[in-house]
C-alpha cells in the first residue's frame, strides 16, 4: 500500500444568511487504498465527490476529519507543510481533465517540460532529458514538438505534453482526474495504453477518476464506486462491472454508452 | 430505405470558413438523404465538420461561415440555403428546429423559463397566454409536469432539467424535423441516459425526424437508425446502424467502433488508430483517411475514392472494400 485514506470526512459550509452558515456533509467516511503498481479506478456521476477526494489527496483541500497517509514518507498529507509538502507533491502528481487549460498558451512544449526539471534542480543535461520524456509519452520525434505552442497541438498531444511534464519529477503516484474525457475517441485508447505502460514499465501507481465505467473496465485493476460522497461499492473491476451488487453501480453499468445495446424508450415519465 | 420519404436532402454541399489567411473549405461535397420519421446520427471527431454541416441544414449561415456550392432541400420544397431571413423564419421552428451545442447553458440566466418561452413564441407572432395549454402539454411530454418549472430561473434547474426545457422549446411549434447538436454533452452519465430515452420516446410518439450529432460513437449507435460517419469534412460512410456495426464498409467506421471500450466487450483488445488528422490547410490529396488507414495502398494516397452507393441512398468512400475486411 502506498497511499491510504482513513475515515475521511469533508463538510462543506453553505451560507444561509449574513450570520448563519450551515454545514453539509460532502464526503462521508471514505476509506481508500492505492497499492503499488496498480491502476485503481474511481467512478461515479457528477457531484459524487470524486474531484474533492482527488484534491484532498493532493493536499489542496483539507478534510474535516480523517487521515490521508502517504506510506513512503510515513506522513499524513493533512498535516504536511513547507518542504515536506513540496517533496510529497513531486511524488504524487495530478493530471487534469482539460488539456486546453493545463498548459500555458504563451510557452512552448520545451519550456513546459523543462520547467519542472529546472525547479527541481535537475543535474543532467536538460535537452537530453526533455527528449527522453517526450519519447516516453509517444511524442516522437521530439524535435518536431519542442518548439510548438499548445494551440498548435491537438487535445491528445497536449495531454501527452502534460504527462511528460508530470513524469519529469519521477512521481510514484498519479491522480488522473478524467484524463481522457476531452480527448477524441480515436486517440483515447493510445492514452489509456500509456497509463498501462506507466504502471507496468515505470511502476507508477495510478488513481484513474472518471464518470465512464467502460474505460475503467479497460484500464483499472480495482474500482471504487462513489455516490453522494460515499463509497457504495468496491472491488475487482471485472467482478464489479459484470456482477454489480449496488443499485447505483447497476445503473451506471446500464447507462454507459455501448454501441451493441439499443436505447428503447421507457414509459416512466 | 426506398419505401420511406426523404426529409432533408443535401446535394453537393461545400461549406467553409473565411479566415485571415483566406478561405478554408471544411464540409466537402456532402451528399446525404435523411429519411423521414427516423433518427439519423452524424458522428465524427472534433473538427470533422459535423457542426458546420448541422448549421447548413437549418440555414444558419453567418460569416465567417460561407457556402460555396450545393443545396439543402428540407421537406421536399424548402431550399434553405437560397431563402431570405423572413422566409427562413417561417420554416425554422415550424418545419425544422435546432438544438445547438451546449444550449442548456445558454438559457438567459435572468429570465424565467416562461419568459424565454414567451420570447420564442412572440418571434413567431404568438404569445404564452393564448398558447398556455399547448406549452404545458409540451412541458409534460418532456417530463416536466410540475408547472412551477415555468416560474423558475435556469439556475434553479439541474442540467438535465435545463436540457428538457431546451427540448421542449424546440418542439413548441410542432416541427417535423429536429436537428440536435450534442444534446447530452456535459450531462451526468445517468442523466444522459434518461435524456436519450426521452428523445427516443418523443421521436416515436410524434414520428419526428431527428438528426442527432455527436462525437460519442458508442452513444450514437445506441440511438440512431441510420448513421453518417464524418472524417475531415467528408461523409465517408452512410448506412443503417446495424449494417455499419456488423459490416462497416469504411475502415474508419470499423476502427472507431473497435477503439471504444464498452461494458459488453470487457477485456477485449482495442484497436488503435495511428496518427492524427492532418488538418484542413494541409488536406490529403487522395483518400482523406489514407494517412492513418492500415489498409491503404499507394493508390489510396494518390487519388480520392468515389462514393460507392448501395441499397439506394447509402454509400461508402473506400476503394479497398471489400478486400480490406479480409486483412483486418
Image (cartoon, coloured by chain):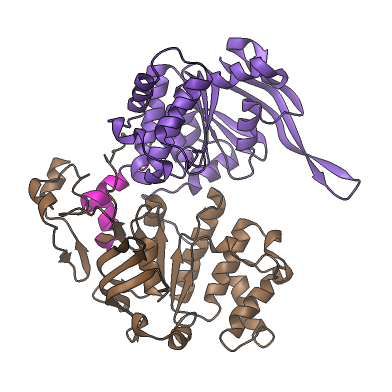
Q: Is residue A218 something that shows in the picture?
A: no
Q: Residue B7: where, in percent of width, then height?
A: 34, 77
Q: In front: A25, or A175?
A: A175
Q: Is residue B175 above or below residue A208?
A: below
Q: Is residue B36 magenta?
A: no
Q: Is residue A200 above or below residue B146?
A: above
Left or right of A154 in this view: A51: right
Q: Name the residue: 64% across, 10% down.
A: A74
Q: Name the residue: 13% across, 58% down.
A: B305
Direction right: furthest residue: A19
Q: Is residue B100 something that shows in the picture?
A: yes
Q: Which color was chain B given?
A: brown
Q: Quadrant of the C terminus of chain B?
A: top left
Residue B125: which quarter of the image? bottom right
Q: Residue A50: where, in percent of width, then height?
A: 60, 36
Q: Is residue B244 magenta?
A: yes
Q: Which color was chain A given?
A: purple
Q: Is residue B285 above or below residue A228?
A: below
Residue B31: which quarter of the image? bottom left
Q: Name the residue: 60% across, 82% down.
A: B121
Direction left: furthest residue: B299
Left or right of B274 in this view: A60: right
Q: Which residues are magenta?
A: B236-264
Q: In front: B8, or A137?
A: A137
Q: Is residue A250 above or below residue B242?
A: above
Left or right of A55 in this view: B299: left
Q: Residue A5: where, in percent of width, then height?
A: 65, 22
Q: Quadrant of the N terminus of chain B?
A: bottom left
Q: In front: B267, or B289?
A: B289
Q: Name the residue: 65% across, 15% down.
A: A83
Amino acid at each position: 500500500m502506498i497511499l491510504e485514506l482513513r475515515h475521511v470526512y469533508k463538510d462543506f459550509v453553505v451560507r444561509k444568511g449574513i450570520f448563519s452558515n450551515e454545514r453539509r456533509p460532502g464526503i462521508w467516511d471514505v476509506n481508500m487504498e492505492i497499492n503499488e503498481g496498480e491502476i485503481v479506478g474511481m467512478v461515479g456521476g457528477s457531484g459524487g465527490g470524486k474531484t474533492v477526494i482527488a484534491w484532498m489527496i493532493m493536499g489542496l483541500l483539507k478534510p474535516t476529519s480523517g487521515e490521508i497517509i502517504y506510506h513512503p514518507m510515513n506522513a499524513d498529507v493533512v498535516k504536511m507543510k513547507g518542504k515536506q509538502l513540496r517533496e510529497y507533491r513531486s511524488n504524487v502528481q495530478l493530471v487534469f481533465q482539460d488539456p486546453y487549460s493545463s498548459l500555458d498558451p504563451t510557452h512552448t512544449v520545451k519550456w513546459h517540460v523543462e520547467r519542472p526539471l529546472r525547479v527541481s534542480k535537475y543535474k543532467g543535461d536538460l535537452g537530453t532529458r526533455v527528449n527522453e520524456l517526450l519519447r516516453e509519452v509517444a511524442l516522437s520525434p521530439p524535435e518536431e514538438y519542442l518548439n510548438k505552442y499548445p494551440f498548435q497541438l491537438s487535445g491528445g498531444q497536449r495531454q501527452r505534453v502534460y504527462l511528460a511534464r508530470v513524469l519529469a519529477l519521477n512521481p510514484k503516484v498519479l491522480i488522473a482526474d478524467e484524463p481522457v474525457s476531452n480527448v477524441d475517441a480515436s486517440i483515447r485508447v493510445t492514452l489509456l495504453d500509456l497509463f498501462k505502460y506507466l504502471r507496468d514499465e515505470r511502476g507508477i501507481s495510478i488513481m484513474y477518476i472518471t464518470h465512464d465505467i467502460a474505460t475503467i473496465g479497460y484500464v483499472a485493476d480495482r474500482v471504487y464506486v462513489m455516490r453522494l460522497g460515499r463509497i457504495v461499492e468496491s472491488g475487482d473491476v471485472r467482478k464489479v462491472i459484470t456482477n454489480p451488487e449496488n443499485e447505483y453501480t447497476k445503473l451506471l453499468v446500464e447507462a454507459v454508452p455501448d454501441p451493441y445495446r439499443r436505447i428503447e424508450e421507457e414509459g416512466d415519465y | 430505405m426506398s419505401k420511406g420519404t426523404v426529409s432533408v436532402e443535401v446535394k453537393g454541399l461545400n461549406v467553409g470558413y473565411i479566415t485571415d489567411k483566406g478561405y478554408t473549405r471544411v464540409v466537402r461535397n456532402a451528399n446525404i438523404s435523411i429519411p423521414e420519421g427516423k433518427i439519423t446520427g452524424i458522428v465524427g471527431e472534433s473538427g470533422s465538420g459535423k457542426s458546420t454541416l448541422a448549421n447548413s441544414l437549418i440555414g444558419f449561415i453567418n460569416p465567417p461561415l460561407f457556402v460555396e456550392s450545393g443545396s439543402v432541400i428540407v421537406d421536399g420544397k424548402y431550399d434553405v440555403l437560397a431563402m431570405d431571413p423572413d422566409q427562413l423564419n417561417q420554416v425554422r421552428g415550424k418545419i425544422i428546429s435546432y438544438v445547438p451545442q451546449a444550449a442548456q447553458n445558454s438559457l438567459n440566466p435572468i429570465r424565467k423559463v416562461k419568459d424565454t418561452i414567451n420570447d420564442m413564441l412572440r418571434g413567431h407572432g404568438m404569445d404564452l397566454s393564448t398558447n398556455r395549454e399547448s406549452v404545458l402539454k409540451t412541458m409534460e411530454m418532456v417530463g416536466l409536469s410540475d408547472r412551477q418549472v415555468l416560474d423558475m430561473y435556469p439556475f434553479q434547474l439541474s442540467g438535465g432539467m435545463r436540457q428538457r426545457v431546451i427540448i421542449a422549446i424546440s418542439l413548441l411549434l410542432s416541427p417535423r424535423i429536429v436537428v440536435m447538436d450534442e444534446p447530452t454533452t456535459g450531462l451526468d452519465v445517468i442523466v444522459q441516459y434518461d435524456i436519450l430515452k426521452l428523445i427516443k420516446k418523443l421521436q416515436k410518439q410524434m414520428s419526428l425526424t431527428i438528426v442527432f450529432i455527436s462525437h460519442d460513437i458508442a452513444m450514437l449507435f445506441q440511438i440512431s437508425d441510420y448513421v453518417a460517419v464524418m472524417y475531415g469534412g467528408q461523409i465517408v460512410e452512410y448506412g443503417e446502424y446495424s449494417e455499419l456495426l456488423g459490416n462497416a464498409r469504411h475502415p474508419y467506421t470499423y476502427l472507431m467502433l473497435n477503439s471504444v471500450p464498452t461494458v459488453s466487450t470487457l477485456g477485449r483488445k482495442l484497436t488503435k488508430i495511428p496518427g492524427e488528422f492532418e488538418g484542413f490547410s494541409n488536406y490529403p490529396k487522395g483518400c482523406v483517411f489514407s494517412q492513418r488507414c492500415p489498409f491503404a495502398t499507394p493508390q489510396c494516397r494518390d487519388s480520392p475514392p468515389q462514393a460507392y452507393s448501395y441499397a439506394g441512398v447509402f454509400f461508402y468512400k473506400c476503394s479497398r472494400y471489400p478486400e480490406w475486411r479480409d486483412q483486418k
